[in-house]
Image (cartoon, rainbow, N blue to C red):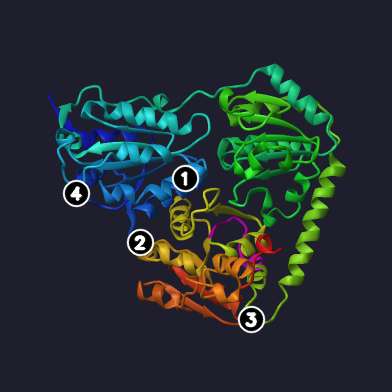
């Protein structure tokens, strides 16, 4: 009889699920997993902070359309991961969160780094379990996989006590079949699909609003089929400012005019909890949610449809092919709103002043970014300027999202570049947010992951400073100032490429040199500290 230990069972189960990479930071409790990865050719990207590992797994999942996996050690390793996982939860991203844990045999006795890790994880995950026997590990991985993907996607936590990873069991019958990792789609009642189509067909100004996961992967493909066949405008609700985000460039303004809204998203703060003030007066809402209990949860709707987003959009897309749609004028009106906003942006973005106006930087970036680029964005005021100036540009956005977790853009860019090495990859962030995960440039250098970070440097926590000035007065500003740090030199010291920009005409040459350097690069741009559109009175 041959035996395997719990770590080997874990890695084998991950391999059976199709996992090829873990994002991780090492620790004693998980070293057996590292060792087992060598035997099944699962690569490990080791980071400088556990939350960065979660952000990278998040980006991997978004880009590859499959769950990302982060592996961290017990105690502080586990707690350090919470922010990245909470961000993935809000972004509806399937991430398997694996943590080593103190010995199961000594729970309650005060063991090293003992903590109710599942209890810590539960509020930021779809589910959280601790494995108590090595033989159960494959089944838990399969269960976690299905839970991540069914309904509204999201992260799941598995706790792995060190003695469970070391426990040996009989090697027989420990492989799982691929189908055990995939949940079945739940389709809606056909009568509800027909009722939804009738409402949309009779509308003068219909609009589709979707949550982040619905804009990606299989659901995203079905969404695009549906809107292409009907001509109905649509909007992904990924910004922490929700319907107030000025970056929607026309589609956001259309919300106040839409008479029928197909809402494939939760009734959360992003849509003002689905209440009447979120939409035009008298607007009828069709709400799609995975569970009946979530349909119209916070506000009544004209029609509720229970079913998985991808399944319902498939039904809708298939059902509209034989119908004549008459929303061309409405779609043109929305496009006209977009173009009007772009003209306003261009007038703002022509400033030659110094420090550089954020919109001038956005306009230069807009002309530079190659089609098909992957672009992560985070931060406060600077991020809002960039969202406004880059809205509609042909790249894949990776946002810090509904949870509003600043500091994520650097690890998101690294994870995205690893997931899709052929895509030009950029991170756009404020100078304050660089401080969260700037050391991940070391990770990128060690693993040979070239990307370009553009830092908008105004030497302040701009969102907070502007708010203090507006509410309390200029003489009441406190704890909002930073130094005009040379972040480009920080990156150079870590082995990357650095560029320092003070004048508008220097932006494009610096971006070109950074991109062609073949290294992780930082373009440090000195910008004017001005309130973003969403912050203006």
Front: mark 4 or 2? 4
Q: Residue at 70% x, 27% y: name it.
A: 316
Q: Residue at 81% x, 35% y: name it.
A: 282
Note whether 149 is above or below 411 in the view shown.
above
The residue labelled by disc 3 is 505
Note whether 193 is above or below 371 in the view shown.
above
Quadrant housing residue 528: bottom right
Q: Is residue 11 visible?
A: no
Between the residue at mark 1 and the residue at mark 4, the CA separation in whole angstroms equals: 26 Å
Between the residue at mark 4 and the residue at mark 2, the CA separation in whole angstroms equals: 20 Å
Disc on the earlier residue, 3 or 1: 1
Of helix, strand and loop, which one carries label 3?
A: helix
Disc on the earlier residue, 1 or 4: 4
Residue 526 x, y percent position in the rendering: 55, 78
Report if the CB atoms under discs 1 and 4 are less than 8 Å apart. no
**Label 2 environment density (alpha carbons within 10 Å; few <14, some 14–19, many ≥20):** many
Front: mark 4 or 3? 4
Of helix, strand and loop, which one carries label 1?
A: helix
Between the residue at mark 1 and the residue at mark 2, the CA separation in whole angstroms equals: 21 Å
Between the residue at mark 2 and the residue at mark 3, the CA separation in whole angstroms equals: 31 Å
Front: mark 3 or 1? 1
The residue labelled by disc 1 is 88
Residue 60 x, y percent position in the rendering: 45, 47
Q: Which residues are magenta?
A: 365-378
The residue labelled by disc 4 is 28
Q: Is residue 408 magenta?
A: no
Disc on the earlier residue, 4 or 3: 4
Disc on the earlier residue, 1 or 2: 1
């Amino acid at each position: 009889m041959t035996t395997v230990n719990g770590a080997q069972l874990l890695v084998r189960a991950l391999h059976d699920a199709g996992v090829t990479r873990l994002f991780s930071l090492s620790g004693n409790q998980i070293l057996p997993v590292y060792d087992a990865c060598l035997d099944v050719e699962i690569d490990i990207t080791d980071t400088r902070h556990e939350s960065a590992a979660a952000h990278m797994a998040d980006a991997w999942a978004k880009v590859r359309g499959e769950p990302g996996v982060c592996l961290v050690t017990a105690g502080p390793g586990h707690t350090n991961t919470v922010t990245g996982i909470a961000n993935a939860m809000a972004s509806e991203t399937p991430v398997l969160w694996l943590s080593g844990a103190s010995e199961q045999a000594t729970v309650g006795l005060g063991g090293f780094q003992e903590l109710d890790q599942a209890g810590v994880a539960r509020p930021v995950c779809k589910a959280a379990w601790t494995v108590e026997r090595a033989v159960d590990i494959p089944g838990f991985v399969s269960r976690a996989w299905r839970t991540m993907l069914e309904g509204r996607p999201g992260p799941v936590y598995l706790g792995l006590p060190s003695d469970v990873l070391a426990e040996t069991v009989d090697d027989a019958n420990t492989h799982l079949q691929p189908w055990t990792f995939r949940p079945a789609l739940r389709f809606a009642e056909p009568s509800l699909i027909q009722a939804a189509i009738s409402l949309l067909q009779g509308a003068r100004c219909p609009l589709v609003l979707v949550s982040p996961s619905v804009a990606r992967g299989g659901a995203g493909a079905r969404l695009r089929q549906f809107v292409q066949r009907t001509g109905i405008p649509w909007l992904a609700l990924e910004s922490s400012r929700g319907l107030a985000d000025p970056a929607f460039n026309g589609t956001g303004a259309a919300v106040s005019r839409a008479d029928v809204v197909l809402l494939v998203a939760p009734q959360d703060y992003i849509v003002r909890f689905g209440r009447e003030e979120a939409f035009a007066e008298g607007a009828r809402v069709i709400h799609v949610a995975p569970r009946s209990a979530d349909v119209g949860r916070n506000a009544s709707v004209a029609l509720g449809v229970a079913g998985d987003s991808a399944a319902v959009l498939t039904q809708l897309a298939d059902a509209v092919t034989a119908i004549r749609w008459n929303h061309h004028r409405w779609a043109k009106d929305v496009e006209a709103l977009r173009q009007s906003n772009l003209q306003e942006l261009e007038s703002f973005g022509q400033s030659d002043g110094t420090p550089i106006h954020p919109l001038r930087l956005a306009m230069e970036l807009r002309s530079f970014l190659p089609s098909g680029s992957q672009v992560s964005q985070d931060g406060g005021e600077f991020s809002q300027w960039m969202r406004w100036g880059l809205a509609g540009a042909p790249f894949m956005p990776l946002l810090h999202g509904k949870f509003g977790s600043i500091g994520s853009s650097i690890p998101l860019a690294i994870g995205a570049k690893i997931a899709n090495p052929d895509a030009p990859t950029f991170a756009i962030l404020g100078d304050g947010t660089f401080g969260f995960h700037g050391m991940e440039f070391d990770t990128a250098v060690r693993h040979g992951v070239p990307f370009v970070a553009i830092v908008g440097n105004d030497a302040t926590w701009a969102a907070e400073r502007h708010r203090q000035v507006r509410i309390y007065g200029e003489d009441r500003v406190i704890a909002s100032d930073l130094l005009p740090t040379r972040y480009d030199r920080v990156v150079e010291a870590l082995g990357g490429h650095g560029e320092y920009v003070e004048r508008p005409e220097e932006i494009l040459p610096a971006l070109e040199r950074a991109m062609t350097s073949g290294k992780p690069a930082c373009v440090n741009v000195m910008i004017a500290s001005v309130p973003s559109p969403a912050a203006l009175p």
